[in-house]
Amino acid sequence: MWADSSFRQAPSYSAISIVNAASNQAGAYAPNTFITIYGANLAWTTRALGSGDVKGDTLPTVLPGTGVTVWVNNSPAHVYYVSPNQVNALLPSDLRPAVTQVRVQVDSTSGPPLTITLEAAAPAFFQMDAHTVIAAHADGSVVTADAPAVPGEYVVLYATGLGTTIPRATYGEIPAKAAPLADMANFGLTLDGVRIDKARIVYAGVAPGFAGLYQVNVQLPEDAGADPEIRLVVGTALSPAALHLPVRH
């Protein structure tokens, strides 16, 4: 049995322990972006979001039985996972680029209010491992070293932090259909430092059925090299370097 909450230690974390959940890097945040907060005393139990927690296609701000709230300014973020040392949440989509305050609260006990800076976009691929992005073949199977993509193939890439869409994401609502990026003119992909022809990017926007998740559908160039470094470009923002897409001729 837990002791009375008045004797529990407050949540502990720092500005550098708040990171983009896809890249695991601090300082890369945008509205509608997944973040991870690392620390201590962040929860008194371990729990992940389950299908039963979603009501009417709306995400919860507190996972039942956890008492954990992540406050972003005056709005509660949508929490996907809590444990004593880690909390994963989705930054509200209705925020604007600005200095923003983040605070973790467990029941009636709060951690320190810390500031992060939200940019218009903070692109980052979700990763299979430290060197490989998560991607899918057209049939939905995962692109891996044992099942690589081939030049000329259509693949689907998964990311967070790509920015505003049309229509704009609704706070807390799981998108039911596609919504492309609002600023496609300044969106791009590079393979080994070379921009892919925009005509090859079939779609870039929200992944239907998954709040906060973006997908990019692209046809790889016929001259794509083996396991190229792949990066997202949104205006002047670039996704982290040294990540690769498994490709074989």
Image: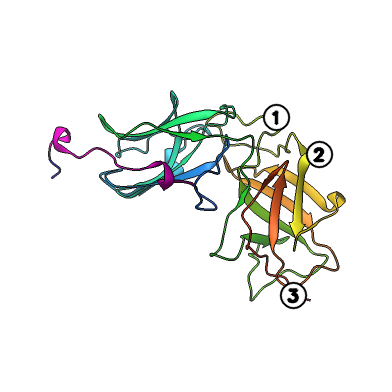
- The residue wearing badge 3 is 248
Quarter-wise, where is residue 206 in the image? Answer: top right
Q: How crowded is the residue under tag 1: few (<14 C-alpha within 10 Å), some, or many (20+)?
A: few
The disc at residue 93 is: none
Quarter-wise, where is residue 137 in the image? Answer: bottom right
In what element is the residue under mark 3?
loop
In what element is the residue under mark 2?
helix
- Which mark sits nearer the N-terminus, 3 or 2? 2
Q: Amino acid at mark 3?
A: Arg
Side of 144 relative to 11 (left or right): right
Question: What stretch of residues is rendered in magenta?
Answer: 4-20
- The residue wearing badge 2 is 185
Residue at point 75% right, 63% down? 192
- Which mark sits nearer the N-terminus, 2 or 1? 1
Q: How crowded is the residue under tag 3: few (<14 C-alpha within 10 Å), some, or many (20+)?
A: some
12 is within the stretch colored magenta = yes
Cα distance between the residues tagged 3 and 2: 30 Å
